[in-house]
Amino acid sequence: MMLKVYLTLSFLLGILLVAQAHGKEKEIGFYQLKRGDLKLNLTNYGATVVSVIVPDKHGNLDDITLGYDDIEQYKNDSWYFGALIGRVANRIGHARFTLDRHTYKLPANDHGNTLHGGFTGFSDVIWTVKGHKEDSYITFTYDSHDNEQGFPGRVEVAVTYVLIGRNKYAVKMIAKPVDKATPVNLAQHTYWNLGGQKSGDILSHKVQILGSKITAVDENLIPTGILESVKGTPYDFLKPRTVGSRVNELPGLYDVNYVIDGDKSRHLQKVVTVRENVSGRKLELWSNQVGLQFYTGGMLNATKGKDGAVYDKHAGIALETQGLPDSLNHPDFPSQIVRPGQTYNHYMLYRFTACC
Ligand SMILES: *[C@@H]1O[C@H](CO)[C@@H](O)[C@H](O)[C@H]1NC(C)=O
Ligand SMILES: *[C@@H]1O[C@H](CO)[C@@H](O)[C@H](O)[C@H]1NC(C)=O
Ligand SMILES: *[C@@H]1O[C@H](CO)[C@@H](O)[C@H](O)[C@H]1NC(C)=O
Ligand SMILES: *[C@@H]1O[C@H](CO)[C@@H](O)[C@H](O)[C@H]1NC(C)=O
């Protein structure tokens, strides 16, 4: 009798503990990383970067990323401010693809195409905090189930933001399919304004992108399959120049994927440098990915952001390293298919300096 009561009690306690652990998993929180003058604020909602604070050339600290003050705004966001994008970042033409002779239909959330993982991609789910040390790193994990947003198989995803030295941080994105082959293409969608998130537009930011080709696209931004030289076009940022210098020759904005130059051995290589000359801040980004989506926030309009900021057209620059868009429907682009036993591995390294 006593034993039975004891067993029942411990069973109930067990359920309670599991329920509690589960509830805790699903709690949304804010987490800080801090070393010297470099400070990041993150949330497990979308594995999102909420703020990045770095000094300018006089040592004044400012937040240089766009974002919101509270979670409700993140849940209502349509710009992917700071978010981690998946299972497949960027566009998938006609919201479908074929893998191992099976055609998968996906949510069409962007002019008949799939954008950034569908209606509820990795940017709109609550991640688990797997480890956090304020002066060092935070790891978010997410277990994506079979058929989530139409994608095949279960995938275990881990994203780690880690401080390196006093002015660098890395983003390590890992994904492992458990039971089926699936496409994976993750991206980090922070918008930068090196003058400070309240400082207005980024047209005077000087940009250098080490990619001499872009993936040409149709009117819905789906790649045609042609890799076009940037030579002589407003897309040529091989030599540093300001975003504003040729933006008027475009239909109003930059939203384009570069093929990054250099060897394709997937070692770390320099992708882009951005400078802002009033603050003197410079951002450099290295990655092991073949592509960079370069978006200058041309569609932003009166969005209410952090600390009273209002983000209008060109308020920030997104620098999204990733595979080439719509690779699933372009067999000649580098494959984004990952099979059980294989690991998807995406590495980004940012360095922040300020001078002169
Ligand atoms: C992180 O950002 C959230 C939302 O703006 C804020 O409530 C929280 O205080 C911030 N945490 C730190 C340590 O700055
Ligand atoms: C949600 O976003 C829409 C635009 O995307 C905006 O019009 C609306 O005011 C937002 N709602 C809240 C509660 O912030
Ligand atoms: C900053 O750069 C802009 C654009 O290149 C230029 O017009 C301006 O004179 C520069 N200002 C300073 C303080 O260097
Ligand atoms: C920006 O938003 C305002 C207010 O919602 C609207 O009146 C205006 O037409 C929008 N501008 C553009 C370029 O979409």
Image (cartoon, helix red, strand yellow):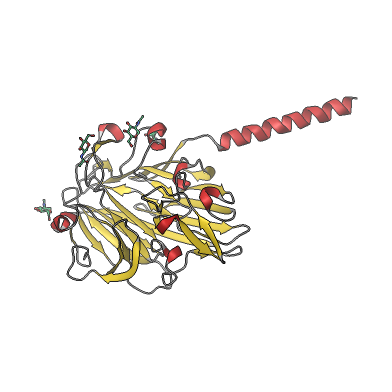
Horizontal arrangement in the rendering, residue 206 relative to residue 216 (left or right) = left
Where residue 240 sits, quadrant-wise, is bottom left
Horizontal arrangement in the rendering, residue 285 relative to residue 85 (left or right) = left
Q: How many labels does the image show?
A: 0
Horizontal arrangement in the rendering, residue 122 relative to residue 77 (left or right) = right
Where residue 131 sits: x, y (%)? 54, 45
Q: Is residue 164 visible?
A: no
Where residue 8 sits: x, y (%)? 81, 28
In the image, 39 versus 8, the foreground residue is 8
Question: Where the N terminus falls, by quadrant?
Answer: top right
In the image, 265 versus 251, the foreground residue is 251
Residue at x 41% of width, y 32% of height:
72
Question: Where the C terminus falls, by quadrant?
Answer: bottom left
Q: Can residue 282 be seen in this view?
A: yes
Most distant residue in the right direction: 1
Residue at x 28% of width, y 69% of height:
213
View quadrant of ligand 2: top left
Where residue 269 sits: x, y (%)? 36, 67
| For residue 151, above or below residue 199 | below
Residue at x 57% of width, y 38% of height:
25
Where residue 278 sits: x, y (%)? 16, 48
